[in-house]
Image (cartoon, grey):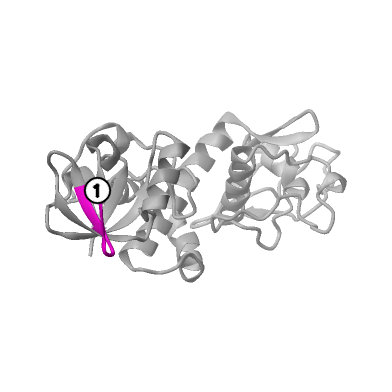
């Protein structure tokens, strides 16, 4: 076994144990904190999400970038020590990744952990940007801290509070949780479908989850995009909303796909 898992009081560490090469040290950094490990797993998840291959051999990395991972656009971009190739032996020994045809892939265990981390990250970012009106750059550091601190129960409450959103502020999918499979009204949602909105109230569009890109394009032409402020005038026989000085009529099935918050 190349290395072993060690645990500290508040910080899990991967690596630093005796190697299987006669007891000599494994090349690269001697250990990874839990947060560093989590960050690498998140990066691998994003890479697989984007259908990018991460080479096991660091010499195959992209030119001009010393890290074998590319920067992501959802706040999980590279940090110091993110060269996953250097940490491959430890991550493999921990059962978090595997090497397939010269590339690094998440194992079943690693994928489950990465999925939960990505869910935490994207829900927390949506909470801070929508509830506190922080932009992604302002909230990035706090999002990274909070995703490691909140409990599974809090994650589910945040998800319910936001109305079980399908996408983060960057448009990337938020992995579904157990709470998404059941309807809960324990916490009034901050974000809800336009279908549930009250007539006469003003709302801000938070995200749109259309069944087709064509529909999304049509809504964009009408001015119905994330961030737009609208007022709901009526629900029958069709939904009529005002965007600026323009009244727009939409069907109920479209109203179900537009998620808003009161302003």
Observer-nearest of 166 and 94? 166
**Image quadrant in which you'd find residue 212:** top left
Residue in the image at 23% along x and 65% along y = 263
**Image quadrant in which you'd find residue 65:** bottom right
Residue 175 is situated, as x and y percent measured from the top left of the image, at: 44, 39
Residue numbers of the magenta segment: 240-248
Q: Quadrant of the N terminus?
A: top right
Residue in the image at 33% along x and 34% along y = 178
Above or below: residue 140 compared with residue 182: below
Observer-nearest of 150 and 261? 261
Observer-nearest of 190 and 89? 190
Q: Could you tell me if residue 151 is visible in this image? A: no
Residue 192 falls inside the magenta stretch = no
Q: Secondary structure at mark 1?
A: strand
Residue 17 is situated, as x and y percent measured from the top left of the image, at: 71, 46
Residue 244 falls inside the magenta stretch = yes
Label 1 sits on residue = 192
Observer-nearest of 262 and 94? 262
């Amino acid at each position: 076994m190349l290395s072993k898992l060690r645990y500290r009081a508040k910080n899990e560490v991967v690596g630093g144990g005796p190697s299987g090469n006669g007891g000599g040290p494994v090349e690269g950094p001697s250990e990874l904190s839990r947060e560093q490990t989590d960050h690498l797993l998140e990066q691998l998840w994003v890479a697989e999400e984007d259908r990018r291959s991460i080479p096991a051999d660091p010499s195959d990395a992209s030119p001009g970038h010393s890290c074998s991972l590319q920067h992501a656009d959802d706040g999980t971009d590279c940090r110091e020590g993110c060269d996953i190739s250097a940490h491959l032996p430890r991550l493999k020994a921990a059962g978090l990744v595997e090497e397939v045809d010269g590339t690094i892939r998440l194992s079943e265990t690693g994928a489950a952990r990465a999925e939960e981390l990505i869910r935490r990250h994207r829900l927390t970012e949506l909470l801070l940007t929508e509830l506190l009106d922080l932009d992604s750059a302002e909230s990035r550091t706090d999002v990274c801290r909070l995703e490691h601190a909140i409990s599974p129960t809090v994650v589910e409450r945040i998800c319910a509070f936001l109305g079980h959103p399908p996408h983060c502020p960057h448009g990337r999918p938020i992995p579904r949780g157990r709470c998404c499979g059941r309807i809960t009204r324990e916490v009034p949602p901050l974000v809800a479908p336009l279908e549930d909105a009250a007539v006469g109230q003003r709302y801000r569009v938070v995200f749109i989850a259309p069944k087709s890109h064509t529909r999304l394009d049509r809504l964009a032409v009408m001015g119905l995009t994330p961030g737009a402020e609208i007022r709901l005038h009526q629900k029958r026989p069709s939904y009529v909303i005002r965007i600026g000085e323009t009244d727009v009529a939409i069907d109920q099935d479209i109203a179900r796909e537009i998620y808003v918050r009161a302003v």
